[in-house]
Image: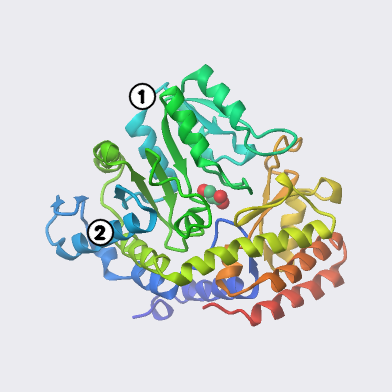
Amino acid sequence: MFVENVDPQISVLIGKERLRQMEGLEMIPSENYASKAVLEALGSVFNNKYSEGYPRKRYYGGNEFVDEMEELAISRAKQLFGAEHVNVQPYSGSPANLAVYFAFLKPGDKFMGLTLSHGGHLTHGHPVNFSGMLYQPVPYSVDPKTELLDYEAIRKLAQQEKPKFILSGYTAYPRAVDFRQFKEIGEEVGAISFADISHIAGLCAAGVHENPVPYFDVVTTTTHKTLRGPRGAVIMCKEVHAKALDKAVFPGLQGGPHDHANAAKAVAFQEALQPSFKEYAKQIVKNSRALADELMAQGFRLVAGGTDTHLLLVDLRNKNVSGKEAELVLEGVGVYCNKNTVPYDPRPPMDPSGIRLGTPALTTRGMKESEMKEVGRIIAKAVASKDDTAAKKRLREDVRSLCKDFLFY
Ligand code: DSN
């Protein structure tokens, strides 16, 4: 029996969501379209299995094929990132990060992470998150003028505070991260090097962004952003930390692994090992740059002056529109993005000054630089016509017709 027969209501909603994804421009930088092969593995019979433990050391019987599948996922991730040890079981990015805290820190221990409003993540030390509640975050900031990471300021803060680890890797930082600098600073102060590369993992795997995995102590990543796999995460680390991290994931924090998700991770890693994935990752960055150029030509100010990655952070203060308004107006014309704080934002997080835009999903659809120019023009027109219903209707049609030429599912 198919969903259509068992549950027509959910079946209709799945259909509507598929249409929304195909008739609109998905520009939230953390989103992507997983392949049908990934979705097939995700919807497979591996969903039905319990397999607490690790390959060949399980607490349940019947894990012959789960073991093989998990070993394949691990070996592919090792090959893709040059990792010594990989744990593919974390359910998602936050649990993966929690496992790293659990393995390396005691409650109250100090660590450094980029403040959320400058492009960090909730799990990098925000006061409402476990990371800020149980441990002692020492937040670092971007430079107020350049809006770039200031490695000398980070070094000074690390020397003064002696954190147990320094967390690098971000959710809204458009420029390249100098992971080697972070490694050096960590070595100078005796801190563990920890990167959360969730956003840029696909770029790191493809060699389009510096990949910290071979030389960092520990690296976490989600598998569904630029990596284009299922929702989930992995932890990669030096062999010396393998035991502590594996113990932190299971039995420390999780029970049975989500074997269907892990099978889909294995498929995504296989896809990412193909030469075409390198081309895909290169095109993501070319597309971001083309979009950045067009938006700047249309008078938008980009945080840090542009992008080296898959994302752009647009400061709307000179456009007389807030991030929340822009998100809504753009949603109305079928462009999906998210409101976002800009560094040193005078406005509150629920109605900040910026929007965050990304190109991974559009690139998956096959769009290139010329389409990015068109998308930039649509965004500019939409923001300028926020109170003009007829203009917005026309733009909605423009988006639909652009999308028709780039169907994915
Ligand atoms: N929620 C993700 C993002 O959008 O960046 C990070 O976890």
- Relative to 147, does residue 294 appear above or below in the rendering? below
Seen from the viewer's position, the closer of residues 375 and 282 is 282
- What label does residue 249 carry, if any? none
Give me the residue at 34% from left, 57% from top: 77
- The first of marks 1 and 2 along the sequence is 2
Residue at the limit of the structure toward the left, as seen here: 61
**Residue 350 location (% of width, % of height):** 68, 43
**Which quarter of the picture shows residue 365?**
bottom right
Q: Which residue is drawn at 47% across and 68% down?
A: 277
Question: Residue 150 location, x and y as percent?
Answer: 63, 33
- The crowding category of the residue bearing disc 1, from other C-alpha atoms within 10 Å (few below 14, some 14 to 19, many at least 20), is few
Which label is found at residue 106? 1
Total number of numbered discs in the rendering: 2
Q: Residue at x 28, y 53 (%)?
A: 257
Q: Mark 2 points at which residue?
A: 70
Report the side of 96 relative to 293 (left or right): left
Inter-mark Cα distance, 1 to 2: 30 Å
Q: Decide if residue 40 is on the left or right side of residue 351.
A: left
Residue type, numbered disc 1: Lys
Residue 234 in percent (x, y) is at 37, 50
User: From the image, which quarter does the N terminus lie in?
Assistant: bottom left
Q: Does the residue labelled 1 lie within 8 Å of ligand 1?
A: no
In front: 7, or 134?
134
Look at the picture and state if 337 lies above or below 122. below
In contact (CB < 8 Å): disc 1 and disc 2: no
Q: Quadrant of residue 114?
A: top right
Three-letter code, disc 2: Glu
Mark 1 secondary-structure assignment: loop
Residue 108 shows up from this direction: yes
Using the rendered image of the protein, determine whether residue 135 is visible from the camera's viewpoint. Answer: no
Q: Say few, some or many: other residues with alpha carbon within 10 Å of mark 2 (under 14 / 14 to 19 / 20 or more).
A: many
